[in-house]
Amino acid sequence: EVQLVESGGGLVQPGGSLRLSCAASGFTFSSHGMHWVRQAPGKGLEYVSVISSNGGSTYYANSVKGRFTISRDNSKNTLYLQVGSLRVEDMAVYYCARDRGWLQFLDYWGQGTLVTVSS
Amino acid sequence: QSALTQPASVSGSPGQSITISCTGTSSDVGGYNYVSWYQQHPGKAPKLMIYDVSNRPSGVSNRFSGSKSGNTASLTISGLQAEDEADYYCSSYTSSNTLGVFGTGTKVTVL
């Protein structure tokens, strides 16, 4: 059974940073691109970042470029998102999701981790 | 990249059919057969319902179907059931950026 379990969210002050993690199991992690998608309270879904199966290619939404860094450790079956210079508008539930292959569709999602940005 | 346009809400009675539209441009929905649909119940993670315009993943009810005409994709739910009450989001590949784009989301209410 495919499982994606996020962790690392929490309360952080504006300008602060966090590292989100997503532990994957039940599939060959190193064969799939992986995404971070976020959802602000009461709002819709927003693509944040994607990383290729071997970590060699990464892409970011303009809204987070230069502040967030996506990475993965295929030996640990874990996806990461380092979020920095946080703004109030970054407050959201952050989901990790598996890409069927590369830039196809998201066939499995984690339960999400909440990042709250407040002073 | 602007979000794809969906109606804010759609409603129907049990047993009826409803259709949710997802309108984009020739740079996304109209240009590629890479439209997917996601269902999200309150407080839960999204779930893939349709991929590549009209394909259903294993385990998804055949009451859900997808189609596309020009720059507009559609999700049809037939034989509407109480459990179908949720938010639905479309998504498409886009030539404007690598990540893709989501729709604005549609709240489905079962009357």
Image: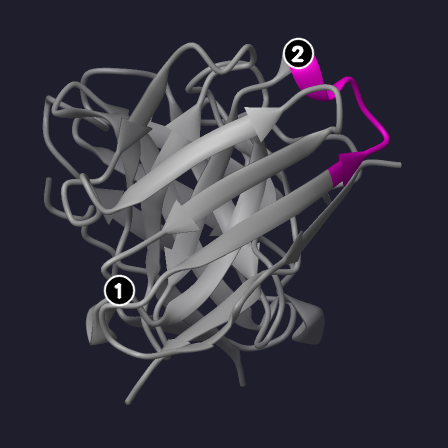
- Vertical side of A57 occupied by B68: above or below: below
Q: Is residue B18 visible?
A: no
Q: Return the x and y of residue B16 as percentages of the image width and height.
A: 56, 65
Q: Amino acid at mark 2?
A: Ser
Q: Is residue A16 visible?
A: yes
The quadrant of the picture occupied by the C terminus of chain B is: bottom right
Camera-side residue: A111 or B87?
A: A111
Q: Identify the mark at residue B109; answer none if there is no mark.
A: none
Residues marked 2 and 1, same chain: yes
Q: Return the x and y of residue B1 as percentages of the image width and height.
A: 10, 39
Check disc 1 and report the residue beneath it.
Answer: A86
Q: Secondary structure at mark 2?
A: helix
Quarter of image, res B36: top left
Residue name at image x 26 percent, y 34 percent: A60
| Image color mode | one colour
Check disc 2 and report the residue beneath it.
Answer: A31
Magenta-tinted stretch: A24-30
